[in-house]
Image (tube, grey):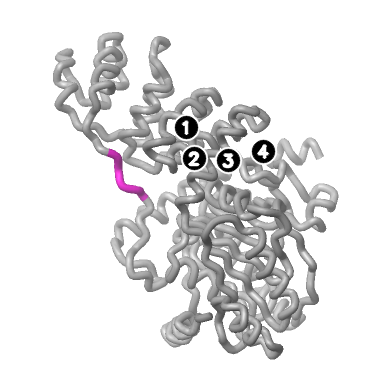
């Protein structure tokens, strides 16, 4: 087992470079095309957030002048100063690239106040600040202090900073307490969506929806995607004022895409949580860990008790949002992802029909795009099991469909491009009509 973990760790370090490069090229390609995503969303998703004000504050000018006087060549190069007239600093607009940020930290002077330097970088970052925060190994106390500084001015940045501190020092009581409070503040600003898919299992659905209502803290959007049930599922949804679909049966992949599309494109949520009807919350504020894990890692799956009990199935992790399990097995009973990941990876491949393989391919596509997990001889998937319990209801397996889906998954196993929720224009029209039918 020890040798396997060592090999996995070494392989992950190598493969992550390829994953990030592929993800970067996909992003650049979309920006160059400057077109709307194929999903038909009214506004194309902007991967880079709005850059910070490039003008320097008085405190920043004083800090920079002191650094220049002490001979900070990296900072002088960033500012484009070719002479020693430091008074020019006052009139300079500054934007810091990710490479500049790393160089400034790696080559900072011994006398440099690292907290002030990183504050300067984050204030003028011309890149998603999470890319810098998650890849720097500064002292946990530095990230903690920065989180406190940014708490009142930028809750998002403060969240990433305290999350990084939590990763570096998971058992620190002061950091853990601050992590909980800042995270609560940040999540309160987010738009969270919860989708439940169902088919002919009204009793399971009722228990799950009731549990969601009982245990979910704060505001959220809830939708039930029903795949043409023949029982009284629709009547139950209407009687309980639950937003739901009313569509003919087209299989689990199509049904998951209905819920995902409604939450992503119609409700425009920041985090999507997708439950199957036999997997339900069992403690208050259950969604918090799922939201955090989605934001930090892009996507997260459910660590079913059957998975974590199997010898060797869990490679690493503690099942927390900041340190999820990495497992060699995956189940689709609960999946959550961020807006960023959803818009880069897209939907489950609509070519899968009926039961099987579609969710696994979707998860592996997240990993190929550079989100958490590893590829290779042994796929390793991120997962947590916090706040949920599974009843494992009877499934609607069809051996013939399952075999076809497995063959399709094998055929497209190296594809990493973004998927739409439909195959062609005809399916697109039908799908959007299904989305338009969602009501209480």
Relative vertical location of residue 396 with respect to residue 378 in this rendering, above or below: below
Q: Residue 382: where, in percent of width, then height?
A: 65, 51
Label 3 vs 2, first from the N-terminus: 3
Q: Main secondary structure of the magenta part?
A: loop
Q: Which mark is residue 147?
A: 1
Q: CA distance from mark 1 to mark 2?
A: 7 Å
Residue neighbourhood size for the residue with mark 3, other residues' Cα within 10 Å, grouped as few (<14), some (14–19), many (≥20): few
Task: Name the quadrant containing residue 329.
Answer: bottom right
Q: Are marks 1 and 2 in contact (CB under 8 Å)?
A: yes
Q: Residue at x 50, y 37 (%)?
A: 134
Q: Which mark is residue 9?
A: 4
- SS class of the residue under badge 3? helix
Write the start and end of the magenta stretch as one range.
48-52
Q: Residue 334: where, in percent of width, then height?
A: 66, 62
Task: Name the quadrant containing residue 361.
Answer: bottom right
Label 4 vs 2, first from the N-terminus: 4
Q: Which mark is residue 14?
A: 3
């Amino acid at each position: 087992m020890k040798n396997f973990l060592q090999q996995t760790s070494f392989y992950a370090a190598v493969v992550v470079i390829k994953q990030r490069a592929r993800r970067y090229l996909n992003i650049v390609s979309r920006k160059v095309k400057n077109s709307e995503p194929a999903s038909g969303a009214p506004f194309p998703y902007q991967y880079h957030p709005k850059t910070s004000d490039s003008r320097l504050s008085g405190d920043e000018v004083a800090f920079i002048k002191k650094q220049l006087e002490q001979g900070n060549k990296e900072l002088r190069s960033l500012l484009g100063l070719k002479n020693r007239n430091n008074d020019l600093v006052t009139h300079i607009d500054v934007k810091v690239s990710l490479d500049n940020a790393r160089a400034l930290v790696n080559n900072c002077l011994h006398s440099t106040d690292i907290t002030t330097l990183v504050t300067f970088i984050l204030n003028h970052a011309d890149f998603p600040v999470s890319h810098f925060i998650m890849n720097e190994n500064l002292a946990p106390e530095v990230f903690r202090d920065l989180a406190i500084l940014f708490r009142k001015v930028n809750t998002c940045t403060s969240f990433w900073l305290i999350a990084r501190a939590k990763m570096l020092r998971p058992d620190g009581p002061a950091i853990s307490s601050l992590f909980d409070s800042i995270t609560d503040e940040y999540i309160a600003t987010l738009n969270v969506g919860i989708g439940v898919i169902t088919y002919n299992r009204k009793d399971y659905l009722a228990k799950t929806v009731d549990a969601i209502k009982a245990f979910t803290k704060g505001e959220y959007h809830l939708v039930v995607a029903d795949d043409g049930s023949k029982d009284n599922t629709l009547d139950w949804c209407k009687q309980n004022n639950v937003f739901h679909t009313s569509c003919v049966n087209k299989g689990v992949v199509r049904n998951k895409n209905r819920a995902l599309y409604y939450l992503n494109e119609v409700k425009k949520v920041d985090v999507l949580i997708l439950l199957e009807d036999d997997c339900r919350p069992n403690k208050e504020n259950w969604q918090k860990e799922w939201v955090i894990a989605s934001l930090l890692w892009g996507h997260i799956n459910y660590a079913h008790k059957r998975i974590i009990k199997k010898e060797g199935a869990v490679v690493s992790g503690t099942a927390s949002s900041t340190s999820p399990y990495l497992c060699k097995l995956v189940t689709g009973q609960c999946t959550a992802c961020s807006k960023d990941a959803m818009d880069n990876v897209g939907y489950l491949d609509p070519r899968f029909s009926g039961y099987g393989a579609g969710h696994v391919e979707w998860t592996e596509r997240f990993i190929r795009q550079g989100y958490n997990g590893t590829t290779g001889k042994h796929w390793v998937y991120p997962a947590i099991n916090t706040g949920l319990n599974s009843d494992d209801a009877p499934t609607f397996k069809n051996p013939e469909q399952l075999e076809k889906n497995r063959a399709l998954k094998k055929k497209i196993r190296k594809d990493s491009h973004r998927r739409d929720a439909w195959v062609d224009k005809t399916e697109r029209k039908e799908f959007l009509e299904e989305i338009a039918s969602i009501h209480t």
